[in-house]
Amino acid sequence: MRKPLAIAAAVIVASVHTATAQSPIDVSHGIRLGETFDPDAAINVRQASYGDKMLYEIDPGERPRDLGKVYVAITPDNNRVYEIWAIKHFRNGVPCRELRDEMFDTLKARYPEAQTKRAMMSPDGRRSVIKGDTKISTACKTGIGKATFYLRHRHTALHSQVAER
């Protein structure tokens, strides 16, 4: 009886190790969270619409899908990427919501072990996929005659360090 329990315990430990050793969520914008980024390599620089963070536009290279312009936010002390943003503008909300939902469904399918959340009271329909220190949120903000898709890829530990300043 002890042998089957020992084998079962070993399988569980191996499964947990494999699950925790899996790579973090990645949406492949040509740069990864935690990498060092040279601000002089940016195509453009803009202030975020809230807070005092700067967003540096990058060239994401080849992508299977047009997600709009791609920006990174970096830590002020060592220029490590703690957020990657994809922002795309539409003339109405329908294609924006479709892209938001498609991206969320794709991420859920790609990372089935990740936690998922939907912001219940959010007017932009924010949905998130969370795994370890990585969180990806999709949203679609709509207004009269316009809509904006957001995909935010965040390293939560690095973001917390920046937020504490």
Image (cartoon, grey):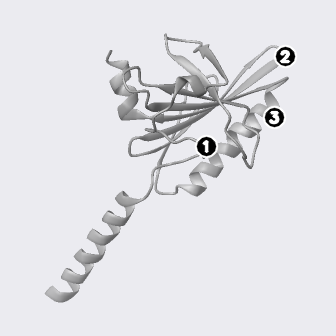
Against 9, residue 134 (above or below) is above
Disc 3: CA contacts within 10 A as few (<14), some (14-19) or many (>=20):
some
Type of residue at label 2? Gly
Q: Earlier in the sequence, mark 3 or mark 1?
A: 1
Disc 1: CA contacts within 10 A as few (<14), some (14-19) or many (>=20):
few
Q: Secondary structure at mark 3?
A: helix
At a point 30% along the width and 71% down the height, the residue shown is 14
Against 65, residue 23 (above or below) is below
At a point 47% along the width and 26% down the height, the residue shown is 74
At a point 48% along the width and 34% down the height, the residue shown is 154
Q: Nearer the viewer, mark 3 or mark 1?
A: 1
State the residue position of label 2: 145
In this view, the residue in front, 74 or 165, is 74
Q: Earlier in the sequence, mark 3 or mark 2?
A: 3
Q: Nearer the viewer, mark 1 or mark 2?
A: 1
CA separation in Å, label 3 and label 1? 25 Å
In the rendered image, which quarter is residue 90 located in? top right
Residue lying furthest left in this view? 2
Query: Is 123 left, or right, of 77 in this rendering?
Result: right
User: Which quadrant of the rendered structure holds the N terminus?
Assistant: bottom left
- Kindly indicate whether the residue at mark 1 contacts the one at mark 3 (C-beta within 8 angstroms): no
Q: Position of residue 24 (x, y in %)?
A: 45, 50
- Kindly indicate whether the residue at mark 2 contacts the one at mark 1 (C-beta within 8 angstroms): no
**Disc sitting over residue 30 in the figure:** 1
